[in-house]
Every structure is written in structure tokens, then in C-alpha cells.
Image (cartoon, grey):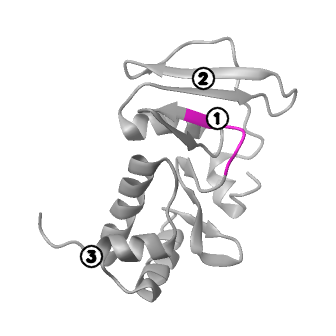
């Protein structure tokens, strides 16, 4: 593999660790994985945030809140895939985890308004159709204005 720039190495390491473990790593874990000083990793996190690749945890630049479609914290959108549990940031990302991992997945989520249980599934590369409607109160072009709220 040709040499990659640091930001690409960091991004690929984040997704590799997440896929392997079911959780989003912090800067220390990425530092060890790619044998790079942690300060450089934190700087790469900042650049990746500016490129909308990830969202650092507010108030702690060493932790990742979101590496879409994966959430760095537990959410109401747990996703079971490849024998592991991941967390999605939203209903859209619950489907995105299956796409990112190229596998079948299931999420036992809940309706954001009524709290009614929802089952979201992807089998053989396609969503299992259900009579659900997803509503996004904020236009996609504005999601990064306040990604935690959105």
C-alpha cells in the first residue's frame, strides 16, 4: 500500500478499530495503533472534524462523539452486526452501519416521538421494508450546524 497522509491513516484506523471492537476509539488507542504521537492524532481529529469526517466529544478533543455512521456514545439506536453491538447516531445511521460493514444488521430502536419500539433490519444488502416513516426536523444541509442536537 502506498504511503498515506496522516489524516487518512487516522481515519482508516478509527473505522478499523470500530469495526473490530464495536466501539469508537479515542486518540490514545489510535496513537498506539498507527504508532504516532497522540498530540498529532488530536490535531488530525481537528482536521477530520473540519472535513466533516468526525465529531470530537464536546469539551474533550481526545474522544470521538461521532464517526458517522458510528456513535462514540450509547444511543437509542443500538445495531447488532457481525456478532457485535454498535451504536448509530440516528435511524439513518442505523442503516449506514450495515452499509459500512457490508453485512446484515438489526437495530432494536425506538420512535423518537412516541418511544414505540422499532426494528430496523438490513438483509442481503437491502433494508427489510417496514411501515415506518423517518422525519428529519432539520434539513441535511444544516446537520453539521449542531450535529449533537440534530
- The image position of residue 1, as x and y in percent, is 12, 63
- Camera-nearest residue between 59 and 84: 84
Task: Give the residue pinned by disc 3.
Answer: 5
Task: Give the residue pinned by disc 1.
Answer: 91
Name the N-terminal-most of marks 1 and 3.
Answer: 3
Q: Secondary structure at mark 3?
A: loop
* Bounds of the magenta segment: 74-79
- The image position of residue 55, as x and y in percent, is 59, 65
Using the numbered discs, state the Cα–Cα distance from disc 1 to disc 2 in whole angstroms. 8 Å
Q: Which mark is residue 78?
A: none
**Residue 76 sits inside the magenta stretch:** yes
Using the numbered discs, state the Cα–Cα distance from disc 1 to disc 3 in whole angstroms. 32 Å
Q: Main secondary structure of the magenta part?
A: loop
Labels 1 & 3 near each other (Cβ < 8 A): no
Q: Secondary structure at mark 1?
A: helix
Q: Residue at x 52, y 63 (%)?
A: 52
Task: Give the residue pinned by disc 2.
Answer: 120
Q: Residue at x 63, y 12 (%)?
A: 130
Amino acid at each position: 500500500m502506498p504511503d498515506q497522509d496522516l489524516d487518512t491513516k487516522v481515519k482508516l484506523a478509527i473505522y478499523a478499530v470500530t469495526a473490530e471492537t464495536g466501539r469508537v476509539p479515542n486518540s490514545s488507542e489510535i496513537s498506539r495503533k498507527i504508532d504516532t504521537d497522540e498530540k498529532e492524532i488530536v490535531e488530525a481529529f481537528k482536521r477530520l472534524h473540519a472535513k466533516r469526517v468526525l465529531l470530537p466529544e464536546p469539551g474533550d478533543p481526545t474522544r470521538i462523539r461521532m464517526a458517522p455512521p458510528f456513535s462514540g456514545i450509547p444511543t437509542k439506536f443500538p445495531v447488532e452486526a457481525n456478532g457485535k453491538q454498535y451504536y448509530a447516531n440516528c435511524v439513518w445511521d442505523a442503516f449506514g452501519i450495515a452499509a459500512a460493514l457490508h453485512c446484515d444488521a438489526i437495530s432494536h430502536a425506538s420512535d423518537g416521538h412516541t418511544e414505540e419500539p422499532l426494528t430496523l433490519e438490513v438483509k442481503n444488502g437491502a433494508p427489510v421494508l417496514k411501515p415506518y416513516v423517518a422525519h428529519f426536523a432539520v434539513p441535511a444541509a444544516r446537520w453539521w450546524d449542531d450535529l449533537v442536537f440534530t
